[in-house]
Image: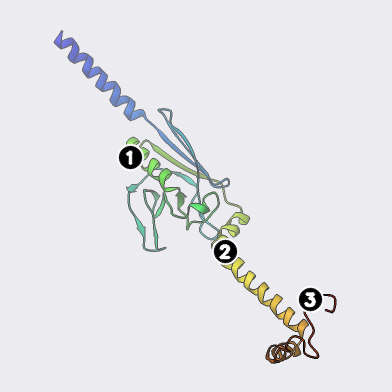
């Protein structure tokens, strides 16, 4: 009986090892639509927004395997944190980003950016399934309009504020021109002129039927 149980345990372990070896992780990056789909052979499915390389920093199309994992990485070349990096070609990696507002449009220097939570999930999946069972495919190209928008968006708030100040200055200048240079002098004379006591000759109330 004990021998039979031992054989059954061995078979179960063998099947478990075989299932693990056959597990697949498929990562597809659609650069044109700025999306990533992730599927596993055990039924997990994910679809996330990405940021690929902006104009002048194209992400490399092709089919790859992960080359290394770095939970915490910093790019000395571009001066940016790259948490949960899955490197797949030289310095190119799929990694988390703090610029989550740019996800959905090209914004990187060629890497594939993800929300940090999604990058952590992908990192764990690659670690679970292994390099050899992970396939990373990049396909498509970002439109120039998206690239230009991403490049300009980083300074959009500053440009809007600058334009607002310029408009305010123009309105103030136009108002001063309409009033003329004599307006300031006349206003000062009115403020400096002594008040006329009530009831005195020349006194005129600022309201009522006599006011004009």
Distance, label 3 to label 2, CA atoms, is 48 Å
Distance, label 3 to label 1, CA atoms, is 84 Å
Q: Position of residue 51 (x, y in %)?
A: 50, 51
Determine the secondary structure under disc 3: loop
Q: Earlier in the sequence, mark 3 or mark 2?
A: 2
Q: Position of residue 58 (x, y in %)?
A: 52, 55
Nearer the observer: mark 3 or 2; the answer is 3
Q: Earlier in the sequence, mark 3 or mark 1?
A: 1
Q: Position of residue 181 (x, y in %)?
A: 74, 89
Q: Are marks 2 and 1 in contact (CB under 8 Å)?
A: no
Q: Earlier in the sequence, mark 2 or mark 1?
A: 1
Labelled disc at residue 127 = 1
Residue for badge 3? 207
Q: Are marks 3 and 1 in contact (CB under 8 Å)?
A: no
Residue at position x 48%, y 45% in the image: 62
Labelled disc at residue 157 = 2
| Residue 6 higher or lower than 158, as above or below | above
| Residue 115 higher or lower than 173, as above or below | above
């Amino acid at each position: 009986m004990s021998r039979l149980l031992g054989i059954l345990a061995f078979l179960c372990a063998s099947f478990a090892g075989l299932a693990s070896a056959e597990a697949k992780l498929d990562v597809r990056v659609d650069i044109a639509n700025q999306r990533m789909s992730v599927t596993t052979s055990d039924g997990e499915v994910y679809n996330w927004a990405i940021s690929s390389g902006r104009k002048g920093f194209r992400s490399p199309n092709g089919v790859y395997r992960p080359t290394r994992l770095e939970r915490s990485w910093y790019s000395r070349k571009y001066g940016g944190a790259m948490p949960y990096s899955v490197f797949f070609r030289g310095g190119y990696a799929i990694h988390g980003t703090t610029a989550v507002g740019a996800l959905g449009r090209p914004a990187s220097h060629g890497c594939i950016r993800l929300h940090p939570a999604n990058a952590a999930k992908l990192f764990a999946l690659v670690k679970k399934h292994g390099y050899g069972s992970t396939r990373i495919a990049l396909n498509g190209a970002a439109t120039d309009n998206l690239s230009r928008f991403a490049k300009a968006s980083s300074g959009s708030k500053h440009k809007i504020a600058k334009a607002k100040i310029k408009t305010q200055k123009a309105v103030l200048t136009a108002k001063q021109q309409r009033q003329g240079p004599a307006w300031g002098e006349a206003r000062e004379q009115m403020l400096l002129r002594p008040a006329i006591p009530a009831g005195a000759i020349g006194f005129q109330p600022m309201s009522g039927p006599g006011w004009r």
